[in-house]
Image (tube, grey):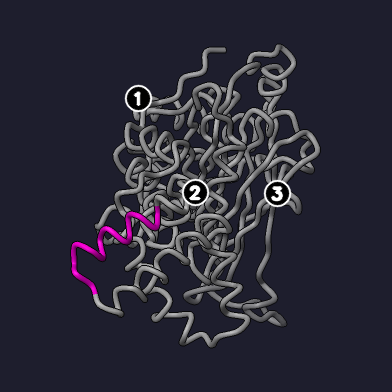
């Protein structure tokens, strides 16, 4: 479901009752003319304010911007909040649509009573989303661990647009990032991440309730793989949701985003974008003996009564499977690109990989990949009673 969201509200749909709570003071003065001696660029201002709830340690962040646009000064208020942490004090407990009213009401009270912002619940509900983090907790059965999952998934590749970063920490925690400037796909050990200091954690905000969960040992003997899709910027959010749902999205409101079917579509789209790529199909397959792979390919060649070209195909498919399944798609592609041109390693290599994946489609996925796939498709709300 949803984790962190950022929404945008444009003045006069909000009022500032405590300008002094912002840094610098947020004093709104409307004008249709550029004051003498100023330029549109020089009129730009940024105002910030953070509020940490003493009850659970969660922080709500405000950023206001003043710009001279459309022949007048405009003020936009951006509100960023981890929705489950605001409501529950942790993001192990996942949200449902039934929580929407409580989320809006809680946020409106924080803004009004603690941050000097007067805004209606209706305005919050219909505010435009500019950032969205979708998250899913995947409990793993013993003896499988989050590290098992990350070691398998790190063999994947999302193409040149995405960088890949596998981070290991002193306490054996691990995290895997596929990232661009506007979209991050992250897999990490949620239990270990709770135990890390802020400087090392994937989830930087540690609420007081989350610290209590660790101190009380409530996660002992639990294995939880956390999968997050982090989208930064309104255009990135709209583009991703358009692809995930198949419906053109030019702007999405908080009410529209707070939808279980949409969140499921978003998580599954990101997961399938990773797992359905031919190179990753080879990477994520169960590690079987080279002899079994060769026998599978030779049986196919025999059934087709293949000629010498069939022998070439067997050799190519066998070699690609062994390389990608052992070393990973990203590693193999990078190795090839050091010797051969982008043209050779582009469509030509992709075509060979696609043929290899099709030829070996009957080899099952690694067990841990299958477990994650089943859990994400079921999309059952993870409940953590605390």
3 or 1: tag closer to the N-terminus? 1
Residue that appears at 37% across and 48% down: 266
Q: Which residue is pictured at 40% across the width and 50% down the height?
A: 292
Tag 3–tag 1 contact (CB < 8 Å): no
- The image quadrant that residue 257 belongs to is top left
Q: Do the residues under discs 1 and 2 have CB atoms within 8 angstroms?
A: no
Residue 225 appears left or right of 216: left
Give the quadrant of the C terminus.
top right
- Expressed as whole percent of the image width and height from the top left, the position of residue 331 reads 59, 65
The image position of residue 350, as x and y in percent, is 40, 73
Q: Which mark is residue 355?
A: none
Does 270 sit above or below residue 226? below
Label 2 environment density (alpha carbons within 10 Å; few <14, some 14–19, many ≥20)? many
Q: Secondary structure at mark 1?
A: helix
**Vertical position of residue 20 compared to residue 344: above or below:** above
Task: Name the residue at 59% across, 26% down.
Answer: 90
Circle 1 residue? 98
- From this viewpoint, which residue is outermost toward the left? 304
Residue assigned mark 2: 229
Q: Would residue 145 appear left or right of 315 to someone viewing this image? A: right
Percent x, y of residue 85: 58, 29
- Which residue corresponds to mark 3? 167
Determine the CA span between mark 2 and mark 3. 17 Å
Instruction: Label 2: state its secondary structure.
Output: strand
């Amino acid at each position: 479901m949803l984790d962190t969201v950022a929404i945008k509200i444009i003045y006069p749909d909000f009022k500032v009752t405590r300008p002094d709570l912002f840094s610098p003071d947020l004093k709104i003065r409307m004008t249709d003319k550029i004051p003498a001696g100023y330029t549109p660029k020089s009129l730009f201002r940024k105002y910030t304010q953070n509020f940490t709830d003493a009850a659970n340690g969660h922080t709500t962040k405000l950023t206001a911007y003043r710009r001279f646009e459309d022949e007048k000064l405009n003020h936009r208020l951006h509100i960023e909040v981890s929705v489950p942490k605001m409501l529950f004090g942790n993001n192990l407990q996942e949200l449902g649509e039934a929580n929407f009213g409580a989320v809006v009401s809680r946020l409106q009270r924080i803004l009004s009573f603690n941050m000097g912002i007067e805004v209606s619940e209706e305005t919050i509900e219909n505010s435009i989303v500019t950032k969205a983090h979708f998250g899913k907790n995947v409990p793993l059965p013993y003896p499988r661990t989050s590290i098992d999952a990350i070691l398998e998934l790190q063999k994947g590749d999302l193409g040149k647009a995405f960088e890949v970063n596998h981070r290991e920490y002193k306490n054996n925690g691990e995290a895997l990032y596929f990232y661009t400037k506007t979209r991050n796909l992250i897999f990490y050990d949620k239990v270990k991440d709770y135990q890390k200091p802020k400087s090392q954690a994937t989830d930087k905000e540690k609420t007081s309730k989350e610290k209590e969960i660790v101190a009380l040992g409530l996660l002992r003997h639990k294995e939880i793989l956390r999968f997050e899709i982090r989208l930064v910027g309104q255009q990135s959010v709209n583009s991703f949701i358009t692809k995930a749902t198949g419906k053109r999205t030019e702007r999405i409101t908080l009410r529209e985003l707070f939808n279980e079917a949409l969140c499921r579509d978003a998580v599954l789209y990101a997961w399938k974008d990773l797992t359905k790529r031919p190179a990753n199909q080879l990477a994520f397959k169960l590690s079987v003996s080279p002899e079994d792979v060769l026998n599978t390919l030779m049986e196919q060649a025999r059934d087709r009564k293949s000629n010498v070209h069939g022998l070439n195909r067997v050799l190519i498919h066998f070699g690609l499977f062994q390389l990608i399944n052992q070393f990973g798609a990203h590693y193999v592609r990078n190795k090839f690109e050091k010797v051969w041109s982008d043209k050779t390693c582009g469509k030509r290599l992709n075509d060979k990989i696609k043929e290899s994946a099709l030829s070996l489609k009957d080899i099952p996925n690694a067990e841990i990949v299958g477990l994650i796939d089943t859990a994400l498709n079921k999309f059952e709300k993870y409940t953590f009673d605390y």
